[in-house]
Amino acid sequence: MHLFSRYKIDHIIFWIITTVFYAYVTTDVLQKAGAWHYWLNIFIRNALLMLICYTNIYYLFPSFFKKGKYILYGLLVLCCLVFFTVFKNLHDTWLHGYIAGNVQKQNFFYNTFYNFSVAFFYMCFTMALILSKNWYKQHLLLQKIQVENLETELRYLKAQINPHFLFNSINTIYFQIDKHNAAARSSLQKFSELLRYQLYECNEEQVAIEKEIEYLKSYIDLQRLRRQNNYHICFEVEEGVRNFSIAPLLLMPFVENAFKHVSRHTDKPNSIKICLCRRDNLLLFKVANSKSNEPATSKGSIGLKNVKRRLELLYANKYELQINNEHSTYAVHLKLQLP
């Protein structure tokens, strides 16, 4: 199937069969008009069919029908049918009427119904084949996602600690910490919030963006407690980033990566900037951090590999990911198409 899709072998087979069949049923043209007009007729007919069929498949259907412009789509399809009919009528009149000498077929409208029906059939048939092929691809992708979700759930269940025991232990440790040690209490509280979100609120396929932002804030606040004063950490969320859902924990690996690989300069500031904004139906997410001159290692890149895989599975053809690894900065730009 991969080879078929990559090299369009199924398209080639379809048009070969179509051409051979048409060549077989029009052998009378070979006898009446000669080999040149016989092959020219086959070429013109199939070229016109390919033109209207691929115009419909790759332009009209995705640009108009999928966007709900049904009337305009129908009118444009009708224009394609009329285009094929007019040009094929002209060629048939010239070939059969004047070259082959059939006086009856010198009438321009003689083959109108036949040519219109052929064009309509091919447009419908090729569209049905493409939709069936796309449905099969989506079916395979859905099965793959389901299998990976089951595997992830099994790994999660194997590694899961009893939540009640865990939170009871955190509460015990919290109250054992001296009340004057506010930093330790705050750290433990932030950690508890992060854990609660992962255990209880990330079981759905989609979560509200507001919850995901609160999770990021808790993580960033926890990281701030661990950093010295020469770290400038900025987290900006524009007003329009609300009232929609995304896959849970999708943004977190990029933030974790920024804190993990941020520079550790002692003579100049270290910086991490995280920004979330919305432009129409696009969520724009940017994470940038200063970095040291040491060469980056491949260790610890599992998180980024996993999130790239999740993006491909959950947002196929609906996202853009750009990573800029420059001399002193590392930046991630993610665009997500919202439903």
Image: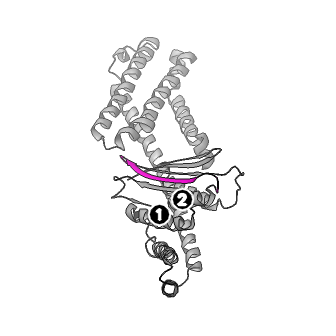
Report x, y in % for residue 108: 34, 17
**Of 277 and 153, which appears nearest the observer?**
277
Earlier sequence position, callout 2 versus callout 1: 1
What crowding class fits label 2: few (fewer than 14 Cα within 10 Å), some (14-19), or many (20 or more)? many
Q: Is residue 229 above or below residue 288?
A: below
Which residue is found at the position 44% from the left and 76% from the top? 200
**Separation of residues labelled 2 and 1 (CA atoms):** 8 Å
Is residue 295 shown left or right of residue 119? right
Q: Is residue 222 above or below residue 238?
A: below
Is residue 146 in view from this perspective?
Answer: no
Tell which of 63 and 166 is nearer to you: 166
**Residue 1 shows in this picture:** yes
Please state the horizontal and vertical placement of residue 43, each as a whole percent of the image. 52, 24
Q: Position of residue 197 (x, y in %)?
A: 45, 72
Q: Return the mark for residue 178.
A: none
Q: Which mark is residue 216?
A: 1
| Left or right of 169, for residue 2 | right
Name the kind of residue labelled 1 in the image.
Answer: Leu
Q: Which residues are magenta?
A: 264-283
Looking at the image, the residue that sits furthest to the left is 71
What mark, if any, has residue 255 been given in the picture? 2
Pointer 2 with pointer 1, Cβ within 8 A: yes
- Circle 1 — which element? helix
Q: Looking at the image, which is closer to me, 214 or 21?
A: 214
Looking at the picture, the colour scheme in use is one colour
